[in-house]
Amino acid sequence: MATINVIDYLSFEGEEGKKLVHVLEDNGVDILHRCGGKAKCTSCRVEVIEGDFGPISEQEQQTLANKGHNGDNIRLSCQVRVSGDATVKAVMTKTNSNLEPGPRPEE
């Protein structure tokens, strides 16, 4: 298990290998995932303060670039898996956007 610290939320344990978006949502973070985890909308993006989620895929990188989210510390929580302790900030949530989260991404 890894410790995930979420800025403006709590710290909790997350199962290694599980998608970050599921760990966040299952622990009360009302993160958006408007496209259902298909790496198309970027609403599930997180700012990685500390930790490493491995190399970024070409699809994730392209989607972020197409939406103007360039930066080494921005990742799509639907595309990364927990691989160790991390501190993140959920960029878009139901609370700060007044949008519905969207369909739960597949495992």
Image (cartoon, rainbow, N blue to C red):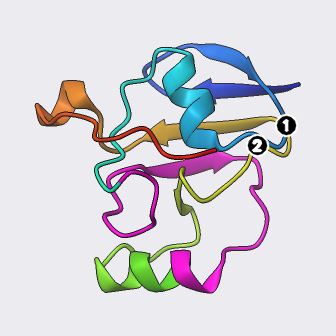
Image coordinates of residue 65 in percent, x first then y, are: 39, 84
Query: Tag 1: Cα neighbours inside 10 Å, few (<14), some, or many (≥20)?
Result: some
**37 inside magenta stretch:** yes
Residue at 38% x, 34% y is 31
> Which residue is denoted by mark 2 in the rendering?
82
**49 inside magenta stretch:** yes
Image coordinates of residue 62 in percent, x first then y, are: 46, 86
Q: Looking at the picture, does residue 33 appear above or below residue 95?
A: below
Q: Looking at the picture, does residue 33 appear above or below residue 29?
A: below
Q: Looking at the picture, does residue 94 appear above or below residue 20?
A: above
Question: Element type at marker 2?
Answer: loop
Residue at 69% x, 15% y is 12
Question: Element type at marker 1?
Answer: loop
> Which residue is denoted by mark 1 in the rendering?
16
Image coordinates of residue 92 in percent, x first then y, are: 30, 42
Res 71 label: none
Q: Which residues are magenta?
A: 36-60
Q: Check whether the beta carbons of the residues at disc 2 and disc 1 lie within 8 A of each other.
A: yes
Nearest the eye: 10 or 25: 25
For badge 1, the amino acid type reads Glu
Which residue reaches farthest left?
98
Residue at 81% x, 35% y is 85
Q: Quadrant of residue 27?
A: top right
Indicate the quadrant containing the C terminus: top left, top right, bottom left or bottom right.
top right
**68 sits left or right of 23 in the view:** left
The mark that comes first in sequence, 2 or 1, is: 1
Indicate the quadrant containing the N terminus: top left, top right, bottom left or bottom right.
top right
